[in-house]
Image (tube, rainbow, N blue to C red):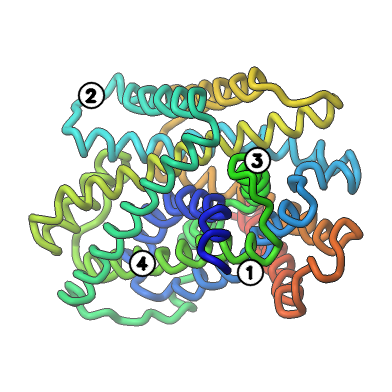
């Protein structure tokens, strides 16, 4: 790809990566390494591989047709779009609450903000308000520029911490535990939650299709399908690689020690930053603290925009009316309010909130994967625009993989 075309296409892939590298990486991957060493790496790699086609299909479909996946669902059957909208409405408040609550912990720790226990929700409210105004004032243009800055800092700081950890070596000898000893009714919820958002929730594939069409409008350049897919894959596989980096950090710095990560947002942020700084060098403290906050800030912005943009588009199509700025503002406001209400009145445990949001995402994953598959192998795309044979096979395996795990999760909660 020519450099000029690449930079005109660049944006949606970085935005996806920045949104993905949040709770799934910073929280879940770090915990996976801390509690199980490298034993769960196979699950993380499997989630990244088998979810990849579904996410890639979002960029591919948007580039080939000029439409989002959401428009495609309506063309397949109006019932599919209504089902998607129901999924969005079911999950958006929980997901927004989860990422905001984690980000609030890093905000408090980074700036030394102390809040009385009775008002624990105030930092989350500040973040929700900031995200609302950031998106309301700038929409996609500011989102695109801001995420590129955040994403670059996040990538460099994470890689720096990773390589320093490799140089210093693990705190305790790493022992590979047999999966038979790890998988149990007690650990299965965490494994499912880990994979639910690895690297991101499947329904966010629609966001990437919307960001792709918005980038085309903003840049005035219509990339080829090959150019769009290349840009997306770059962001996707960088996020996948960073998920392993966080596992290594958790395994090298926590596994086998008596140290544990606290079960609250500020305690978790403090634990991660202090632990990394203590082992990597005191000079890394501000880097790690800033990296953790920027990672989660990027996720907060991407999640609120993605849910608002996708919900507004779905409603507009069902009403057979054009989208308006007012609709977008309404949805980012409602999503922010819903996230705040969830944190304020329904948040009882940091870990439970994260697990609930990720498990909901995993339950709906097979449905979205199937719809995206139907679209890219429909008459909407020409033969040359469709994925190759290898991607086709992986996508079918992915649908089966997600279905089996969702059924297994349903069986677990039914019998345990």
Going from N to C along the chain, the mark reached first, 4 or 2, is 2
Residue indicated by mark 2: 115
Which mark is drawn over residue 50?
1
- Secondary structure type for disc 1: helix
Q: Residue at x 75, y 34 (%)?
A: 314
> Mark 4 or mark 3, which is nearer to you?
3
312 lies above or below 18: above
Q: Is residue 228 left or right of residue 378?
A: left
Which of 276/300 is in front? 300
Q: Hey, which residue is sitting farthest left in the picture?
A: 282
Residue 197 visible (yes or no) = no
Going from N to C along the chain, the mark reached first, 1 or 3, is 1
Residue indicated by mark 4: 247
> Mark 2 or mark 3, which is nearer to you?
3
393 lies above or below 406: below
- Other-residue count near label 2 (Cα within 10 Å), few / some / many at <14 / 14–19 / ≥20: few
Q: Is residue 26 left or right of residue 200?
A: left
């Amino acid at each position: 790809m020519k450099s000029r075309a690449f930079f005109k296409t660049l944006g949606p892939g970085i935005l996806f990566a920045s949104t993905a590298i949040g709770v799934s990486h910073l929280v879940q991957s770090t915990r996976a390494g801390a509690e199980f060493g490298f034993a769960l790496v196979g699950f993380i790699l499997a989630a990244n591989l088998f979810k990849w086609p579904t996410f890639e299909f979002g960029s591919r479909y948007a580039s080939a047709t000029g439409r989002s996946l959401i428009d495609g669902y309506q063309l397949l059957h109006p019932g599919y779009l209504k089902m998607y909208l129901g999924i969005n409405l079911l999950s958006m408040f929980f997901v927004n609450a989860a990422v905001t609550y984690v980000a609030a912990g890093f905000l408090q720790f980074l700036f030394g903000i102390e809040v009385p226990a009775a008002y624990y929700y105030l930092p989350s409210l500040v973040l929700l308000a900031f995200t609302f105004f950031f998106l309301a004032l700038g929409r996609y243009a500011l989102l695109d520029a801001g995420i590129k800055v955040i994403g670059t800092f996040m990538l460099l700081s994470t890689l720096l911490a990773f390589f320093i950890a490799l140089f210093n070596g693990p705190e305790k000898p790493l022992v590979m535990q047999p999966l038979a000893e790890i998988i149990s009714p007690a650990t299965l919820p965490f494994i499912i939650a880990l994979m639910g958002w690895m690297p991101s929730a499947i329904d966010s594939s629609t966001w990437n299709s919307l960001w792709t069409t918005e980038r085309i409008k903003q840049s005035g350049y219509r990339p080829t399908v090959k150019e769009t897919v290349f840009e997306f894959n770059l962001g996707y596989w960088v996020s996948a690689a960073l998920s392993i980096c966080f596992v290594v950090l958790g395994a090298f710095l926590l596994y086998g020690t008596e140290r544990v990560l606290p079960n609250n947002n500020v305690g978790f942020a403090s634990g991660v930053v202090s632990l990394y700084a203590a082992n990597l060098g005191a000079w890394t403290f501000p880097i790690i603290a800033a990296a953790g906050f920027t990672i989660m800030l990027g996720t907060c912005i991407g999640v609120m925009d993605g849910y608002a943009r996708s919900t507004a588009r779905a409603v507009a199509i069902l009403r057979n009316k054009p989208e308006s700025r007012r609709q977008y503002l309404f949805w980012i406001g409602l999503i922010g309010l819903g996230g705040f209400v969830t944190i304020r009145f329904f948040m009882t445990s940091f870990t439970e909130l994260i697990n609930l949001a990720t498990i909901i995402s995993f339950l709906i994953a097979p449905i979205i994967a199937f719809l995206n598959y139907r679209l890219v192998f429909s008459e909407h795309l020409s033969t040359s625009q469709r994925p190759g044979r290898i991607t086709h096979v992986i996508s079918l395996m992915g649908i089966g993989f997600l279905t089996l795990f969702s059924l297994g999760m349903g069986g677990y909660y039914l019998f345990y």
